[in-house]
Image (cartoon, rainbow, N blue to C red):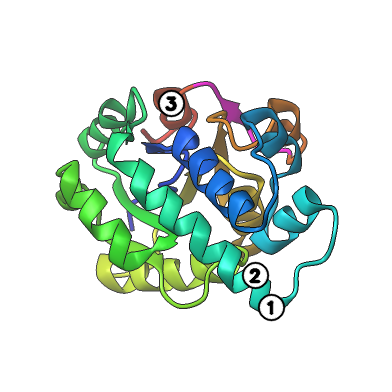
Amino acid sequence: MRPHIVWDWNGTLFDDQPMVIAGLNVALAAAGLPPTDQETYQRLYTRPVQVFYERLFGRLIEPDEWEVIDEAFHTGYREAIIDAQLARDAADALHRVEAAGVSQSLLSMYPHEYLLPLIDRFDLAGRFLRVDGLRGQGGGVKAPYLEAHLERVAAANGGTPAEVLVIGDAKDDAAAAAHVGVACVLYDGGSHPRHELEATGFPVANSLTEAVELAAWV
């Protein structure tokens, strides 16, 4: 079987950091709290997402309040997302992988029904062996979703890939890769301060093309 790359979407191929902050500030307003900024987001961000909000709020969040906050975030994010674009070298990175004969798929924790129109908006559907967004309740860790995604990729690919590389921008991507025992390159796209990405022990790239180049088989 040939090697395979699993791409993250939000914050990796899709440059949406300003939209994340916009959605976050809508959620904060819904809770009666002042807005925040990118630096604070980077410093506190973690998964499960509710833990991140509890760090930001400085207190526990009850289930009923969490539902309101989560919905407010997604409403604000969807309103702002019309201005978001792909990362500056996303198209080049995807082309390099394709030209090398390496299969690629996409796994996102963004809701599947909203992810697919975005993939179509940038005419990317044909690039991926499989696209999986979040189905069901959001906010959790990526590890079990990556495990399920790779099982589906193996079924679509005619067998388990010889090697798998996850490319993402978050510590949660690293944790998911470690959970299933595959390689990972982290893209310094803004979700965390660089030193936190480096602390995972996985390589950190300044660009998506650099991330791809770190895979010896691309």
**Mark 1 or mark 3: whose residue is earlier in sequence:** 1
Measure how far apart labels 2 and 3 are at the Cα level: 40 Å
**Of 55 and 189, the residue lying toward us:** 55
| Disc number for residue 66 | 2
Is residue 202 part of the magenta span, yes or no? yes
Q: Can you tell which of label 1 and label 3 is closer to the viewer? A: 1
The residue under label 3 is: 213
**SS at mark 1 in the image:** helix
Q: Against 89, is 163 above or below?
A: below
Name the amino acid, label 3.
Answer: Glu
Range covered by the magenta-colored residues: 201-206
Main SS, magenta region, reads loop
| Disc number for residue 63 | 1
Residue 111 placement: quadrant: bottom left
Is residue 79 part of the magenta span, yes or no? no
**SS at mark 3 in the image:** helix
